[in-house]
Amino acid sequence: MSIEENVQQILKELKEDVKLIAVSKTRTVEEMEQAYKIGIRDFGENKVQELVDKYDKFHKDVHWHLLGHLQTNKVKYIVGKVHLIHSLDSIKLLEEIEKRFKAKDAIANVLIQINIGKEESKTGIYLNELEEIMNKCEQCTNVKVKGLMCIIPKGTEEENRKYFREMNDIFQELKGKNYKNISMNILSMGMSGDYKIALEEGSNMIRVGQGIFGPRNYK
């Protein structure tokens, strides 16, 4: 199927309140153009350099999402360019985002990334660190937390469902509380291989790359 057909197929499966992020890392602007043509305005990149390059070359009405691990020394390059940072994963990073965005009088919308499977190979905070980072977020003026994000371990449908459900339970619990600078609007979970299960378990933002653009060429 073509990129357009893939997008149309996925959009048919989504409720109105679910946002589809087209994961465009390693993809050409020409490929992205095909998704843009049929209405996609949210694109996700893993690397700061690639996001910045495409920001200058692509349509100005696009929302850019930074999905990958964000190094503190790269924060300064995305001020005013990124719509949502999905990968807030440390207090050190939070402080750098606050500093850089405040200097430019800009607001950083972020998601707290939770390492729900406690995988050493993945970034994200552990659940026992969540309260501390949220307390720090409440003290910020230029960082606004919009929700949570996770990348779950590879596993069976049953295992996937368990992690997604656990994330949704945390999300719903936090949603019921009042915080400063924190609103639980977005639960970003689910990628090409597991987004249907994620949707069933409460996700309202999915990140799809191969499911839109086809298999990735790493050469």
Image (tube, helix red, strand yellow):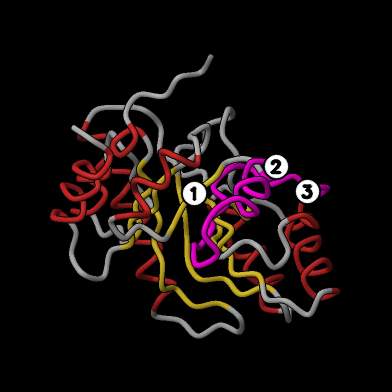
Residue kind at label 1, given as amino acid type:
Gly
The residue beneath circle 3 is 74
Q: Which residues are magenta?
A: 48-73
Q: Are marks 1 and 3 in contact (CB under 8 Å)?
A: no
Dot 1 crowding, Cα within 10 Å, few <14, some 14–19, many 20+: many
Quadrant containing the N terminus in the rendered view: top left
In this view, the residue in front, 1 or 186, is 1
Q: Which mark is first along the chain, 2 or 1? A: 1
Q: Position of residue 193 (x, y in %)?
A: 28, 33
| Numbered badge on residue 44 | 1
Q: Secondary structure at mark 1?
A: strand
Q: Is residue 4 a member of the stretch shown in magenta?
A: no
Which residue is drawn at the image coordinates 31% and 48% (left, top)?
164
Q: Is residue 16 left or right of residue 55?
A: left
Q: Is residue 69 a member of the stretch shown in magenta?
A: yes
| Numbered badge on residue 49 | 2
In this view, the residue in front, 62 or 34, is 34
Which residue is drawn at the image coordinates 52% and 59% (left, top)?
59
